[in-house]
Image (spheres, grey):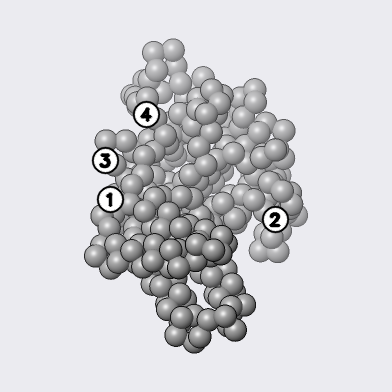
Amino acid sequence: MSMILFAYVVRVTDGLPLSASSDFEYSRELQECKKQLKIVSKMLGQFPGRGTVKSNQLHIHFTSSQGIAYMTICCSYYPTTMAFCFLEELGMEFVSTFEVAKIHVVSRPYAFLEFDSVIQKIKWHYNYSNRPSLKISVTNIQRELKLTPPRQVNVDDIVVPNGTPNGHLHLQSNSAPSYRLEPASVVGILSVILNIMCGALNLIRGVHLIEHNFQCYLYLFYVSARIIKAAGALILICICNSYLFGLRNFWQIFFHIGVASLSTHQILARKLTERLHDCGV
């Protein structure tokens, strides 16, 4: 069972969401907790570097550095130290992936949504191995939390009965974010057609047919961890074609791998955009 349920990266100065995990859950408790997290993200300037919002079943933990805040929703029984280890590692990966100067000038929500693949990898590591990587020292985090305990934020201080946090910040009821891919390019459409051709040539080989169909799917539709899945599909196609080196000549194998490489490039080049009418998480 997952213990880290949701992760969120936000700019402290204006609460602009920069990235988030795309694994949507539909339990009532988690949806309510996400609303609280969204409110807190707009009030981070009022809180110190670390803080925790506790409820019966779920806790919100957050930490901020260099004007960027990293937030997570965890099960109430998940150790606080491990939650902050997760946030520290998330922060290290984010600032090492993107330039801080660029982060502070973007104006579009979820401008770094591709970071979702990194979030998923770190979440899996903490949920299923229950220990941080070598980059993070649990002992150091424990020592820091003892010296400067995270600010305990009362839920009542965030949401009052009339739905207005602290009397001035209104909570808008939004559904989960809706993402779409940029319009398909001519080269991208060509890669889909070529993949269909390769699939037709592999009707008698079910695995190869699935490989090329999967590449078409990755190009046409948004899925989480696109980078990892696209790279995995390309590697699998290369390996499978290497085993056919007696049944196919060099040019046939070159054609299939070339189409797979073109499709992978187009999958990675096709960026995500968020529908402006729905920027909630």
In what element is the residue under mark 1?
loop
Q: Is residue 172 left or right of residue 128?
A: left
In what element is the residue under mark 2?
loop
For label 4, count other residues whose C-alpha is less than 10 Å away and answer few (under 14), some (14-19) or many (20+).
few
Pick the front one: 190 or 197: 197
Residue 261 on image: x %, y %: 43, 73
Q: Relative to 124, say whether 92 is above or below.
A: below
Compute the Cα span from label 3 to label 4: 12 Å
**Residue indicated by mark 2:** 132
Indicate which disc residue 276 carries: 3
In what element is the residue under mark 3?
loop
Sequence-first disc among 1 and 3:
1
Pick the front one: 54 or 232: 232
Amino acid of disc 2: Pro
Based on the displayed image, in which of its 4 quarters is residue 280 positioned?
top left
Amino acid of disc 1: Ser
Sequence-first disc among 2 and 1:
1
Compute the Cα span from label 2 to label 1: 33 Å
Amino acid of disc 4: Asn
In what element is the residue under mark 4?
loop
Compute the Cα span from label 1 to label 3: 12 Å
**Residue indicated by mark 1:** 107
Compute the Cα span from label 2 to label 3: 36 Å
Q: Marks 4 and 3: in contact by CB < 8 Å? A: no
Indicate which disc residue 174 carries: 4
